[in-house]
C-alpha cells in the first residue's frame, strides 16, 4: 500500500519571513561591516554605534573576534584557509541575524577585497555596508593595546596583518573613518547619518 505524504507540509511555507520580523521590530535590518587594521578602532566604534542605535529603539547585534573566536570558530587557527573559513562562518551567522530583522555589526580585520566580497555575496550586497576604519598603521602600532604589533615585529606572531601579511584597503567603502583624525563621537555621528535613513521604518 502506497504511503500518502499529504500530511507533510514544506516548513518554508509556514516560516515567517524577514519582512514579518522587521515589522515586529519596527526597523529595517542591515549588515554594517567594519574592516581595518588591528587597533584601528573597529570594535570601539562598533560598541559606541550599538549604544546609539539602541538609544533610538533599534535592536542590534555585534559580531567580533572575541565572541566568535571563543565560540562558533574556536576550532580555527590563523592559516590562510582558516581565515577565509572564519569570515565565511561569520557571514553566514550575520545573514541569519539580518534575516531576523536585526541590525548586525561585524568588526573584523578581513584583510582583502576577495574575503570581503565573499562575505557580501553570502549576506547579500544590498544589505552589506562596508565601513573602512582607515587609521594608519603607525597610529595602530602606537596604540598596540594587546601588544600584538610588538610580538609581530619580534617574529613571535606569523602572518600578522600590517606587518608580515598585507592589508588591502577597500576600493569603494560606504564610509572611511580615520580615528587618528576623528573623535569617537565624530565617527559615530558620521555613521548615524549614513545608517539611520536605511534602518528606520517610516
Image (tube, rainbow, N blue to C red):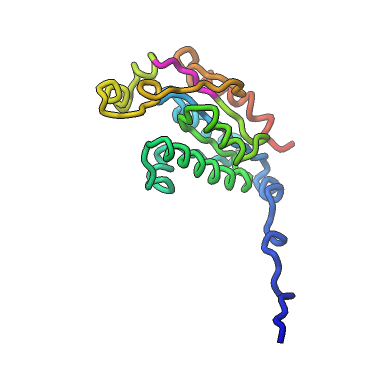
Task: Give whichever of 92, 114 is nearer the camera.
Answer: 114
From this view, report whether residue 35 is shown above or below residue 180: below
- Residue 111 position, x and y percent, is 47, 27
Q: Which residue is pictured at 48% across the width and 21% down the height?
A: 184
Q: Please identify the quarter of the rendering in which residue 171 is found.
A: top right
Q: Position of residue 67 (x, y in %)?
A: 42, 42
Residue that protrudes farthest toward the bottom in the picture = 1
Image location of residue 119, percent across then percent down? 56, 37
Quadrant location of the C terminus in the rendered image: top right
Residue 100 magenta? no
In the image: residue 180, left or right of residue 14: left
**Front position in the image: 107 or 102:** 107
Decide if residue 177 is on the left or right side of residue 142: right
What residue lies at 49% left-to-right and 16% top-to-bottom?
Answer: 178
Give the magenta-colored segment's residue range: 132-137
Q: Is residue 103 left or right of residue 9?
A: left
- The residue lying at 70 percent from left, 81 percent from top is 3
Q: Is residue 97 above or below residue 155?
A: below
User: Residue 20: percent from the left, percent from the top?
Assistant: 70, 50
Amino acid at each position: 500500500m502506497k504511503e500518502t505524504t499529504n500530511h507533510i507540509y514544506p516548513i518554508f511555507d509556514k516560516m515567517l519571513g524577514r519582512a514579518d520580523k522587521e515589522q515586529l521590530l519596527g526597523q529595517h535590518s542591515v549588515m554594517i561591516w567594519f574592516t581595518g587594521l588591528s587597533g584601528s578602532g573597529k570594535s570601539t566604534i562598533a560598541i559606541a554605534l550599538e549604544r546609539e542605535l539602541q538609544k533610538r529603539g533599534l535592536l542590534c547585534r555585534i559580531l567580533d573576534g572575541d565572541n566568535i573566536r571563543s565560540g562558533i570558530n574556536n576550532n580555527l587557527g590563523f592559516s590562510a584557509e582558516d581565515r577565509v573559513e572564519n569570515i565565511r562562518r561569520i557571514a553566514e551567522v550575520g545573514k541569519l541575524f539580518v534575516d531576523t530583522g536585526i541590525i548586525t555589526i561585524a568588526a573584523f580585520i578581513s584583510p582583502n577585497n576577495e574575503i570581503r566580497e565573499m562575505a557580501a555575496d553570502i549576506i547579500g550586497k544590498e544589505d552589506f555596508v562596508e565601513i573602512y576604519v582607515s587609521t594608519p598603521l603607525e597610529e595602530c602600532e602606537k596604540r598596540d593595546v594587546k601588544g600584538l604589533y610588538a610580538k609581530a615585529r619580534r617574529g613571535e606572531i606569523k602572518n600578522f596583518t600590517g606587518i608580515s601579511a598585507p592589508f588591502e584597503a577597500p576600493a569603494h567603502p560606504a564610509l572611511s573613518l580615520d580615528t587618528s583624525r576623528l573623535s569617537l563621537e565624530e565617527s559615530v555621528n558620521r555613521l548615524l547619518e549614513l545608517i539611520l535613513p536605511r534602518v528606520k521604518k517610516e
